[in-house]
Image (cartoon, rainbow, N blue to C red):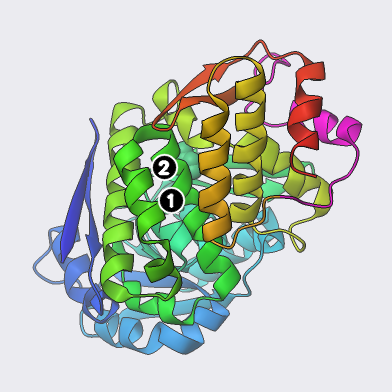
Amino acid sequence: MSEITVNLPHCKYSVLIESGIIAKAGQQLLASLGLSDMKDIKVAIIADEQVFNLHGDPLITSLKNQSDGVYAFSQVEGEKQKTLERVRSYYDQLLSAGFDRSSCVISFGGGVVGDTAGFVASSYFRGISFIQCPTSLLAMVDASVGGKVGVNLPQGKNLIGAFHQPRLVLIDPLVLDTLPERELKSGLAECIKHAVIQDPELFSWTKKNIKSFLKRDPKFLSELIAKNVEVKARVVEQDEKEQGIRAHLNFGHTFAHAIEATLGFEKIKHGEAVGLGMLAASTLANKRGLCDASVRTDIYEILELAGLPTRADLVSNKELIESMKKDKKARAGKMRLILPTKIGEVGVFEDVPENELIPAWDSIR
Ligand code: GLY
């Protein structure tokens, strides 16, 4: 088992990575709550329906061994499910089942389920314990660590949310066996992002082993997850509320959010959009003289190896730029772009004129 600890001024939690760990969720939860017995502690599993059907039994059995009040709620996957209406329906169900301040919420699914369940946990009775059990590669290496939770509004993605750190994160690489291929690749894009923003050695290691990840070799996948959780954990420890270095994790994301908003979430996966966003950002950085052209080539090559798209059928530059301006990372109407200076280093730039965005967009169409 790998254990990575996230140390924050107000809390500390473990990310445990082990094949088969979901069958030990009850014991791990008990230990993390610091209790000798949790028979009376109510536990709600908020799950992706498909993942729950495939992998839910050992989780339920293990939790029922510890608690007499285990409830399971499931939802279909998809960004459209991340709504206040859904959150409201969970509040109703938790209230009817008698959930109180001592109760816990466990998310069992990808990023959408984690964000929604986490938001429920952050706000129900002003916040109850939350456990992340991510089942997509993307949620394992990114969304499950760091406490960002929230839902979408019709006006935009993640506009309502909170920082609510989990008490425990349980990662079972075995569940990746049934993850659809496109989702696996989408998760790889966030791993590539971590390497580009922080660590040239991780970049080379990721590139060298990409075929093993795609073959779902469990040893390599476990190592990939551990290395990437480590990157995420260290960033969050330095800047929990995104006032500084945590913004680096948004590399490629301002472009990506504009792609997702204009193409629609059904057409493009988040990681695919992030990969394209990293390419557009590196074109921009090179044209500004911030980095060599080789940075873009390196990113392009690793995305190709991972089977991620390097071009897309995009809407007009005007529409894309309008969408970028609405991104919630914009401050006082100014876009904030994370641009690479070399593999392993990025910076934050707020002074990019709109006309410089055009060649960046054109480089991925
Ligand atoms: N996914 C970016 C962050 O957690 O800050």
* Residue at the left extreme of this rendering: 36
The image shows residue 227 at horizontal and vertical percentages of: 28, 51
Tag 1–tag 2 contact (CB < 8 Å):
yes
Residue 191 — which label?
1
Amino acid type, label 1: Cys
> Can residue 163 be seen in this snapshot?
no
SS assignment at label 2: helix
The image shows residue 185 at horizontal and vertical percentages of: 54, 63
Q: CA distance from mark 1 to mark 2?
A: 5 Å
> Can residue 327 be seen in this snapshot?
yes
Magenta run includes residue 333: yes
Identify the magenta region: 311-336
Task: Check disc 2 and report the residue beneath it.
Answer: 194
The majority secondary structure of the magenta stretch comes to: loop
Amino acid type, label 2: His
SS assignment at label 1: helix
The image shows residue 168 at horizontal and vertical percentages of: 27, 57
For the residue pair 222 and 132, the one nearer the viewer reads as 222
